[in-house]
Image (tube, grey):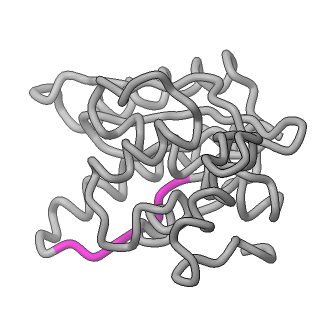
Amino acid sequence: MRILGIDPGSRFMGYGVVEGRRGRASHVGHGVIRVDPQAPLERRLGELHATLGQVLALYRPEAVAVEGVFTFKNARSALILGHARGVALLAATQAGLPVHEYAPARVKRSVGAGGAGGKGAVARMVALLLEMPQLLEERADASDALAIALCHLAQARPGVPAGPVRSRASGRRKGAFAALADRLQPAVRRPGGVR
């Protein structure tokens, strides 16, 4: 199963693609769509839509996962983010793909960063789970998008670990989520059931 995760934004929209194969998740691609912050909102949204369409055509995911709405103190910021989320939902629907939404705290917990974990914690866990050689050097939007994709993969295929890591005790490879859960027991439970 190939999932495209989207971290919506009106100036920076992160995307990340993961694939569940042979009982593990692997990194397929990621990036940040950048638009001119000085351009009118409608032009930015149009550019985001066009570029996201290219991303969908390039990676051909089977489903799209988007970060859900969360509370904003500034109503204008919430409205603009809502427009960007709408663009992501529209592009996915036009491609005939199912869309799944996840709350930010749920996404963080799904990669082991904790509901209150910051963007740095999410980036570190994504790099660990996907065995990326170093932390993502781009904006946090890309690592957030990968975390969203991993969250959906864990929900869609319960028991599929996020990625392989070596167990220190035995030297055997095991799922990263399982290894992390072993270290954090009993605070972490493996994801189960569908959303």
Up the image or down, 184 lies above or below 43; here it is below
| Residue 34 rendering spot, x and y as whole percentages | 29, 24
What span is colored magenta in the figure?
66-72
| 133 relative to 165 in the view: left or right | left
Q: Please indicate, yes or no, whether residue 87 appears anywhere in the rendered image.
A: no
Name the residue: 57% across, 59% down: 180
Is 150 included in the stretch rendered in magenta? no
Name the residue: 13% across, 75% down: 73
Q: Give the residue furthest to the bottom.
A: 186
| Residue 182 rendering spot, x and y as whole percentages | 62, 67
Q: Nearer the viewer, residue 93 or 71?
A: 71
The secondary structure that most of the magenta stretch takes on is: loop
Q: Give the residue furthest to the right.
A: 22
| Residue 107 rendering spot, x and y as whole percentages | 50, 62
Name the residue: 30% across, 54% down: 81
Up the image or down, 139 lies above or below 76; here it is above
| 22 relative to 193 in the view: left or right | right
Q: Please indicate, yes or no, whether residue 86 appears anywhere in the rendered image.
A: yes
